[in-house]
Image (spheres, coloured by chain):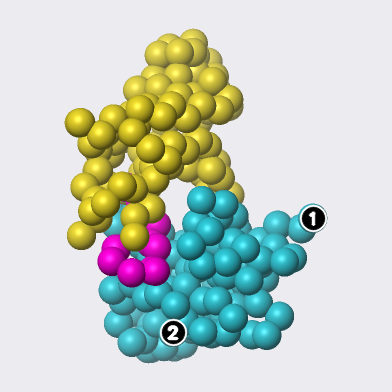
Chain colours: A yellow, B cyan
């Protein structure tokens, strides 16, 4: 079946530090890949996505590149801010064998950015 | 345009009771999915409804059920609550099944089972 493995947190950084959150996946076919962000007390919001190999998703200074050869979709940001403190989820959509598309999530990584 | 609305925001129940959670999707969205979020398991898919029909189901026991009404609003029910059912339950809506690349989440219902 499909699965997503992301680095366990929590991750604590100082403001303006470089961020990497690793994400690898196992899936049948050609999945679409996503990063979602959950701010305290809120639901999930789509941060960025990539739908095919070598695509780069980007938003709000965050980037992730769909690497089919390493089955990875690592999230990066060059300079984090306190407002980036949240839980980040890597996810994929893959047709599991029919018309039933399913969204599979990693367990989430808590990021805390200190001023 | 209003977002996905979930009620209630918080709920406290005791073991053995049952609970019903409600979700109103974004206007025009006809597909509703439910997820359970816990610190240990992360986000796990419960089920998806479209046009009042369950289209997809995750690996949860039969105590977890749901339904969708003609106005696309959805409810999920958990019977005979167990301590392990304590979680944040998230609802998400999309225009239709398979449109998961444009999925919008509500803020969730935090269920505590004592």
Task: Tell me if I can see residue B10 in this picture.
Answer: no
Name the residue located 48 percent from the left edge and 62 percent from the top edge: B98
Mark carried by residue B94: none
Mark carried by residue B65: 2
Measured from the top left, where is residue B19 in percent x and y? 50, 83
Callout 1: chain: B
Which of disc 2 and disc 1 is earlier in sequence? 1
Instruction: Please tell me which residue lies in front, A80 or A2.
Output: A2
Q: Residues within 10 Å of mark 1 (few under 14, many from 20)?
A: few
Q: Residues within 10 Å of mark 2 (few under 14, many from 20)?
A: some
At numbered mark 2, what does the secondary structure look like: helix, strand or loop? strand
Name the residue located 76 percent from the left edge and 58 percent from the top edge: B2
Measured from the top left, where is residue B87 in percent x and y? 42, 64
Instruction: Please tell me which residue lies in front, A40 or B24.
Output: B24
Residue A99 in the magenta stretch? The answer is yes
Left or right, residue A27 beside residue B43:
left
Nearer the observer: mark 1 or 2; the answer is 1
Callout 2: chain: B
Left or right, residue A111 beside residue B109:
left
Above or below — where is B19 with respect to A4? below
Q: Quadrant of residue A94?
A: bottom left
Instruction: Please tell me which residue lies in front, A67 or B23.
Output: A67
Above or below — where is B65 with respect to A17? below
At numbered mark 1, what does the secondary structure look like: helix, strand or loop? loop
Left or right, residue B73 beside residue B109:
right
Disc 1 designates what residue?
B1
In the rendered view of the protein, which quadrant contains the C terminus of chain B? bottom left
- Magenta region: A96-106
């Amino acid at each position: 079946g499909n699965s997503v493995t992301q680095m366990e947190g929590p991750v604590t950084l100082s403001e303006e530090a470089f961020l990497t959150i690793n994400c690898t996946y196992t899936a049948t076919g050609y999945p679409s890949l996503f990063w979602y962000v959950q701010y305290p007390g809120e639901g999930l919001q789509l941060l960025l996505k990539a739908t095919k190999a070598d695509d780069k998703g980007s938003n709000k200074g965050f980037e992730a590149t769909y690497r089919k050869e390493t089955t990875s979709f690592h999230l990066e940001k060059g300079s984090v801010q306190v407002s980036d403190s949240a839980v980040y989820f890597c996810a994929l959509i893959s047709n599991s064998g029919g018309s039933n598309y399913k969204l599979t999530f990693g367990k989430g990584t808590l990021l805390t950015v200190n001023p | 345009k209003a977002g996905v609305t979930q009620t209630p925001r918080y709920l406290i129940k005791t073991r053995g009771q049952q609970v019903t959670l409600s979700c109103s999707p974004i206007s025009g969205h006809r597909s509703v999915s439910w997820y359970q979020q816990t610190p240990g398991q992360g986000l796990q898919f419960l089920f998806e409804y479209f046009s009042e029909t369950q289209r997809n189901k995750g690996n949860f026991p039969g105590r977890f059920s749901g339904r969708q009404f003609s106005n696309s609003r959805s409810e999920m029910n958990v019977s005979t609550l167990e301590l392990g059912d304590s979680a944040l339950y998230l609802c998400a809506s999309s225009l239709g099944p398979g449109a998961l690349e444009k999925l919008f989440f509500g803020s969730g219902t935090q269920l505590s089972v004592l």
